[in-house]
Image (cartoon, helix red, strand yellow):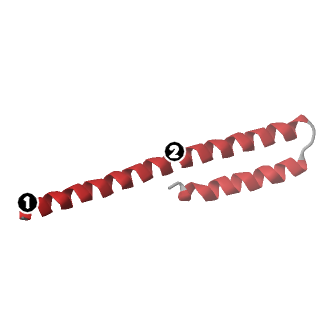
């Protein structure tokens, strides 16, 4: 679902990793912490979107099945 944003996250992770190699001290932990939190947020949003998408698909299948049953029952 969030496939269009994945390249941006990958680019941010690459840039962050390169930055960590160039800096030292407390800044390393700060950058790493920001990267970890951003990746966790992205994954959380991705999981929520996927669950909602799955739920909608399931509801659509149920709706189609109900319509099919109705049409079958009314055609008898």
- How many dots with numbers? 2
Which image quarter: residue 71?
A: bottom left
- Residue reaching furthest front? 76
Q: Any mark on residue 2, and which?
A: none
In the shown orientation, is residue 29 left or right of residue 15?
right
Question: Whole-percent x and y of residue 26?
Answer: 89, 35
Badge 2 density bin: few <14, some 14–19, many ≥20, Cα 10 Å: few
- Foreground mark, 2 or 1, reads 1
Image quadrant occupied by the C terminus: bottom left
Pointer 1 residue: 74
| As drawn, 4 above or below 51 | below
Which is more N-terminal, label 1 or label 2?
Answer: 2
Q: Residue at x 50, y 56 (%)?
A: 1
Q: Residue at x 62, y 41 (%)?
A: 41
- Residue reaching furthest right? 25
- The residue closer to the viewer here, 70 or 42, is 70
| As drawn, 68 above or below 49 | below
Q: Residue at x 92, y 42 (%)?
A: 24
Question: Whole-percent x and y of residue 9?
Answer: 65, 53
- The residue closer to the viewer here, 31 or 58, is 58
Pointer 2 residue: 48
Q: Residue at x 49, y 51 (%)?
A: 50
Question: Whole-percent x and y of residue 48?
Answer: 51, 45
Q: Secondary structure at mark 2?
A: helix
């Amino acid at each position: 679902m969030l496939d269009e944003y994945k390249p941006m996250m990958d680019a941010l992770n690459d840039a962050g990793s390169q930055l960590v190699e160039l800096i030292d001290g407390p800044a390393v932990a700060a950058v790493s912490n920001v990267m970890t939190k951003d990746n966790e947020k992205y994954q959380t949003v991705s999981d929520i979107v996927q669950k909602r998408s799955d739920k909608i698909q399931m509801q659509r299948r149920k709706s189609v099945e109900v319509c099919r049953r109705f049409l079958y029952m009314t055609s008898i």
